[in-house]
């Protein structure tokens, strides 16, 4: 696209550029000047900078500046910027970091990608993390983030940490729970949960250690991100996957749902064997009250046969519970000293409570061994019946 075409599209699509900044006096002016070549619809959030940032911003009366009295984190600054953008009537916001790593001319990449989309989309700049000069810790952190984003949403991306993004302001959540760097993970996961497409677009990146000022605190921020991912994974398994499963049932006819989402008749023997193995493992594990929820969630996540996994998980139905308890306590007894005589005791949950560690160890051994045996047995049986379906 030519520059005039990009400028027209920015205006027609009601796009603004949001620049959160904190003590980036070396690069801020260059970033703003580069963005001004494409649009004057710029919102800068000065997140309590203590350097010459206020003086630099005073040179640009044509842009919107929000100055915060103290630094409260990048996520907080972006949230405030989003709120202002919506007040001004914008439908999309392109966020670009002020540390100089992003090239303003890549704004055209986001605009062109948006024009090719039929529905709203959240676009994330895909940086070349393998190029020279990229810190190894940044590359590792990106791979780590990519994995958990896939686990939580089922969407595979090559870059989930880039701050160069295009947000659909009318589709993203209205409330958030994180104020700092982890905000950029929370928003893309929760936007994907709202069934908004999240995609990568290729962008350039510049890492100049003489100019770039990073405010990422490795230990504190990585801990915060890890805690956030733990919460998001829990919500994914306990709510999002079951919710999507129910929604699929509502959208499809009963016959189509049974065929595509339950029977999955085109599943391979290996898939069906893994489904049985998963069901047995969950059913014999000490997740009382959560067996059905876990087995359906994990089956959807790993694209296994849900009905087979669910049936197999019923090895822990009430009539079988005494046998499961006895076997677990027996298998765990060699590893834990106990004064209780398991064989002469009444098999109930009080016995489990008094011998909890023994039960947990034994149930892990029982679940793993029986899962392997059932999975292998199922595969061999199905392979004998239909050897071509592998």
Image: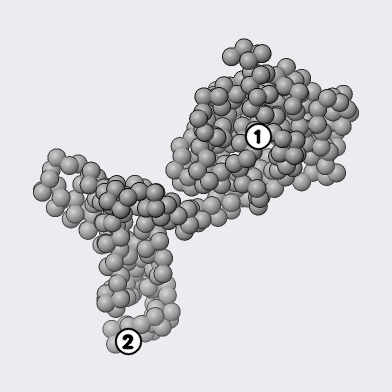
- Does residue 2 sit above or below 255 in this rendering? above
**346 sits to left or right of 139:** left
Where residue 282 appears, x then y in whole percent? 34, 62
**330 sits to left or right of 138:** left
Residues 208 and 280: in front is 280
Where residue 268 appears, x then y in whole percent? 22, 44
The quarter of the picture where residue 357 lies is bottom left
Which residue is denoted by mark 1 in the rendering?
91
The quarter of the picture where residue 138 lies is top right
- Does residue 259 sit above or below 37 in this rendering? below
Label 1 element class: loop
Measuring 70% from the left and 19% from the top, which residue is drawn there?
A: 38
**220 sits to left or right of 44:** left
Mark closest to the chain's N terminus, 1 or 2: 1
Where residue 327 appears, x then y in whole percent? 28, 73
* The C terminus: image quadrant: top left
* The N terminus: image quadrant: top right
Which residue is denoted by mark 2 in the rendering?
345
Crowd around label 1: few <14 · some 14–19 · many ≥20 (10 Å): some
């Amino acid at each position: 696209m030519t520059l005039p075409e990009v400028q027209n599209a920015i205006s027609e699509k009601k796009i603004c550029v949001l620049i959160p900044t904190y003590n980036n006096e070396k690069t801020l002016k260059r970033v703003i000047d580069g963005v001004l070549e494409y649009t004057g619809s710029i919102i800068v959030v000065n997140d309590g900078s203590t350097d010459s940032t206020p003086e630099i911003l005073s040179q640009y009366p044509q842009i919107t500046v929000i100055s915060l009295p103290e630094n409260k984190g990048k996520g907080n600054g972006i949230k405030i910027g989003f709120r202002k953008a919506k007040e001004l009537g914008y439908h999309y916001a392109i966020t670009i970091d002020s540390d100089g790593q992003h090239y303003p001319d890549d704004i055209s990449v986001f605009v062109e990608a948006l024009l090719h989309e039929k529905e709203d989309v959240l676009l994330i700049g895909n940086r070349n993390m393998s190029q020279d000069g990229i810190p190894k810790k940044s590359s590792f952190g990106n791979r780590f983030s990519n994995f958990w984003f896939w686990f939580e949403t089922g969407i595979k991306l090559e870059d989930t940490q880039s701050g160069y993004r295009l947000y659909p302001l009318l589709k993203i959540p209205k409330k958030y729970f994180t104020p700092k760097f982890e905000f950029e993970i929370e928003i893309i996961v929760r936007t994907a949960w709202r069934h908004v497409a999240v995609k990568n677009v290729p962008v350039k990146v510049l890492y100049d250690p003489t100019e770039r000022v990073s405010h990422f605190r490795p230990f504190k921020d990585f801990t915060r991100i890890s805690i956030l991912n733990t919460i998001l994974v829990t919500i994914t398994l306990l709510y999002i996957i079951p919710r999507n499963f129910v929604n699929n049932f509502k959208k499809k006819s009963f016959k189509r749902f049974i065929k595509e989402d339950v029977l999955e008749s085109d599943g391979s023997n290996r898939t069906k064997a893994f489904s049985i193995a998963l069901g047995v493992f969950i059913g014999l594990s000490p997740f009382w009250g959560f067996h059905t929820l876990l087995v359906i969630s994990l089956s959807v996540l790993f694209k296994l046969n849900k009905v087979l996994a669910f049936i197999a998980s019923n090895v822990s139905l009430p009539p079988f519970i005494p046998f499961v308890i006895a076997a677990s306590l027996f298998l765990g007894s060699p590893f834990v000293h106990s004064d209780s005589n398991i064989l002469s005791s009444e098999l109930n949950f009080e016995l489990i409570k008094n011998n909890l560690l023994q039960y947990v160890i034994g149930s892990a051994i029982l679940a793993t061994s029986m899962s392997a045996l059932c999975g292998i047995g199922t595969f061999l049986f199905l392979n004998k019946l239909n050897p071509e379906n592998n």
